[in-house]
Amino acid sequence: MSMKKRLFFSLLIGLVILTLLLTGCGGSKTGKGGGDDDFPTIIDFDAEAYEGTAWRCAASENYPEITVYIDEIVDKDEFYHYYRGSVESSATGTINITGDLYNNISLTATEFYGMRLITFLVSATGDEGDQIQINGVIDTSKPNTVIVAYLVFNDYEYDDETSSEIIKFIKL
C-alpha cells in the first residue's frame, strides 16, 4: 500500500473512531444526558504538561529506536490538542513536525468505564518520503508509558491485534 493511501486510511480510521466516541443515543442511565454511560467521553486534561517532553521506544528487528519530541501546542479544537515537535530515528534522521496534514502530533483524553486514557497520535513524513505513524494510548494511571496500537515505519506495519509483540514509548 502506498504511503499516501496508508496515511489516508489511518486518518479515516481515526475519524471513524472519533465519530464513534462522540455519538450517543441522547439519554443516559444516570440522567446526566449525552448517551450511554458506558461510552467513551472526551474529558479535559493538562495538555500543557506534554510540552517539552520526549518519548522513546527501543529498537527491534523491524524498526530502529524511535524518539518523539513534543515541543509546544500550536492549535486545539474541541477534541484534540495539536503540537509542534519532531520524530527521530537512525534510519530517517529528524523529521520536523509542523502541524500540517502529513506532520502532526495530536493528543486527546477520554474516560471509559472509569479509565482515563490519552490518545497519542503522531504522523510524520520526511522530505525523502520516510514515514512514521504512531497510534497509541497513555493510561493516566501510568502517565510515563504509551502503549502502541498501530505503528508504521516506512514499509513496516505493526498492529497490536495481529502481533504478539508489545511496543511501548517511555517518557524520557
Image: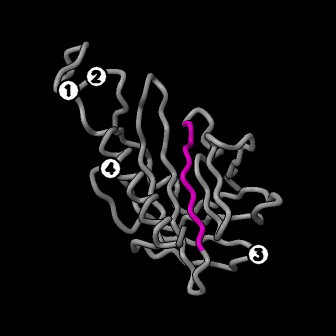
Instruction: Name the N-terminal-most of marks 3 and 1.
Output: 1
Identity of the residue drawn at 35% across and 47% down: 16
Q: Which residue is tagged 2?
A: 36
Q: Residue at x 51, y 66 (%)?
A: 123
The disc label shown at residue 82, or none: none
Residue 140 position (above or below residue 82): above
Q: Secondary structure at mark 3?
A: loop
Q: What is the quadrant of the N terminus in the image?
A: bottom right
Magenta residue span: 131-139
Provide the secondary structure element on which disc 2 rests.
loop
Q: CA distance from mark 3 to mark 1?
A: 48 Å
- The answer to which of marks 3 and 2 sits earlier in the sequence is 2
The amino acid type of the residue labelled 3 equals Ser
Q: Residues within 10 Å of mark 1 (few under 14, many from 20)?
A: few
Q: Can you identify the residue that label 1 sits on?
A: 25
- Residue 71: x percent and y percent? 53, 68
Please, what is the dominant secondary structure of the magenta stretch?
Answer: strand
As measured in the structure, the alpha-carbon distance from the residue carrying label 3 to the one carrying label 4 is 33 Å
On the picture, is 135 further left or further right than 93? left
Quarter of the image where the C terminus is located: bottom right
Residues at marks 3 and 2, CA–CA distance in whole angstroms? 46 Å
Front residue of 13 and 146:
13
Give the residue displayed 50% in from the left and 65% down from the top: 6
- Give the Cα separation between the discs numbered 2 and 1: 7 Å
Q: Secondary structure at mark 4?
A: loop
Residue at the (73%, 56%) spot, across then down: 57
